Image (tube, rainbow, N blue to C red):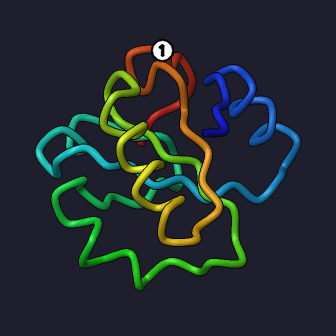
Amino acid sequence: MKSITTEELKALMAQGKQVNIIDVREASEVAGGKIPGAVNMPLGLLEFKMNELDKSKEYYVNCLSGGRSSSACQFLDNQGYKVTNVEGGMMAWDGEIE
């Protein structure tokens, strides 16, 4: 499974690169803040919402600490999606939140 640190993700964003971020935390967790531009798809609903994703795009999957996003990456990878796990999740994120 591919992974990226929060520092590397911030650098991509600062360069103006197109980053598609999926936050697999529960809606109540996301209400406390998320990485700007991240789309919330709770892990429990991912199986039902994955058809909203484009298999030709790369997605960065984020959660609170990296555990749920790792599970989500394994699932999505098995379904043919291009995914990268965000190591450490929001606990490691020290950038802007929205």
Give the image location of residue 3, x and y in percent: 64, 32
Compared with residue 39, is residue 13 higher up or lower down, i.e. above or below?
above
Mark 1, residues whose alpha carbon is within 10 Å: few (<14), some, or many (≥20)?
Answer: some
Residue furthest right in the image: 15
The residue located at (39%, 75%) in the rendering is: 50
When the figure is inspected, residue 8 is found, relative to residue 47, above or below; the finding is above
Counting from the top left corner in percent of width and height, residue 88 is at: 46, 19
Task: Kindly indicate the quadrant of the structure image that contains residue 75.
Answer: bottom left
Question: Looking at numbered disc 1 in the image, what kind of residue is underneath it?
Answer: Ala
**Callout count:** 1
Residue at image point 70% right, 71% down? 57
Residue placed at 11% from the left, 45% from the top? 28
Quadrant containing the C terminus is top left
Percent of width and height locating residue 25: 25, 44
Would residue 30 be found to the left or right of residue 51 on screen? left
User: Where 25 sits versus 49, above or below?
Assistant: above
Q: Secondary structure at mark 1?
A: helix
| Residue situated in front as seen by the camera: 80 or 29 | 80
Residue to which mark 1 is pinned: 92
